[in-house]
Amino acid sequence: MKKITSHLYQLSLGFVNAFLIEDDEQGLTLVDTGTPGSLPKIFAQMEKAGKDPRDIRRIIVTHAHTDHTGSAAAISKELDIPVWAHADTARLVERGLPGDAALHVSPGLLNQVIYQLFIRRGGSTIDPFTITRLLNDGEVLPGGVRVIYTPGHSAGHLALLLQTDRVLIAADICANAAGLHWRTVYEDRELGRQSILKAAAFDFDMAVFGHGGPLTSAANTRLHAKFA
Ligand SMILES: [Zn+2]
Ligand SMILES: [Zn+2]
């Protein structure tokens, strides 16, 4: 588990990241859950960093894809905690679906390879789970976490802005693996571009992604410059 800011940690789960928000009053919030079977990895990384997994109060899933929701059912059941998400994500995961729209592979050979290896074979179902709180665009959660509705990569995709730490959890609006670039697939890449620019208009310095490493400075300016 890697400390990003005073309130944010990144958990590396193979090719995908999950995040832990730590707030004095709200306790721990797990953002995304990795692929199916990631519960032991998440718990072990937390324990190694001196955090008790039993202190997780809630899960937020950024979108329905298997690499983000794959262990949500198991963790929420194990800890008896609620899961929050956008209504479009709820509609999918409650039926056990990581998505129901056609995906378009982004330009480049590497994206084709990643798509064939990880996404096409990633499985078309997940263990269903219930979303107990629907998150809406513009809402600021206790602890100062702003919800930014950012569809395009996936229906119901949310980015989360930790306003006090000026860090954006960008999830899969794009990726930062071997440079800042498109995520491998989009349901609607032009809508995805608009969502990146919408998020980039907020005030933050750092950004973390579902795939790849963090952007550690001027992240909003760099996102805007890359995708405008
Ligand atoms: Zn995704
Ligand atoms: Zn992903």
Image (cartoon, helix red, strand yellow):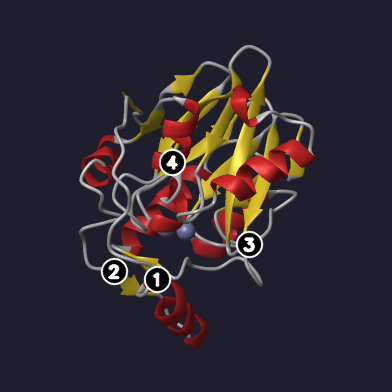
Q: Residues within 10 Å of mark 1 (few under 14, many from 20)?
A: some
Q: Nearer the viewer, residue 105 or 163?
A: 105
Q: Position of residue 48 (x, y in %)?
A: 78, 41
- Mark pair 2, 3: CA separation: 21 Å
Q: CA distance from mark 2 to mark 1?
A: 10 Å
Q: In what quadrant does ligand 1 lie?
A: bottom left
In this view of the protein, can residue 144 be seen by the observer? yes
Q: CA distance from mark 1 to mark 4?
A: 21 Å
Where disc 4 sits, the SS reads helix
- Image position of 151 with respect to 133: above or below: below
**Local SS, label 2:** loop
Q: Amino acid at mark 4?
A: Ala
Disc 4 from disc 2: Cα separation = 27 Å
Residue at 66% in and 48% down: 11
Question: What residue sits right under mark 1 in the picture?
Answer: 119
Q: Which mark is residue 212?
A: 3
Which residue type carries mark 3?
Answer: Gly
Residue drawn 60% across the image and 25% down it: 54
Amino acid type indicated by mark 2: Leu
Point out the tag, 1 or 3, that comes first from the N-terminus: 1
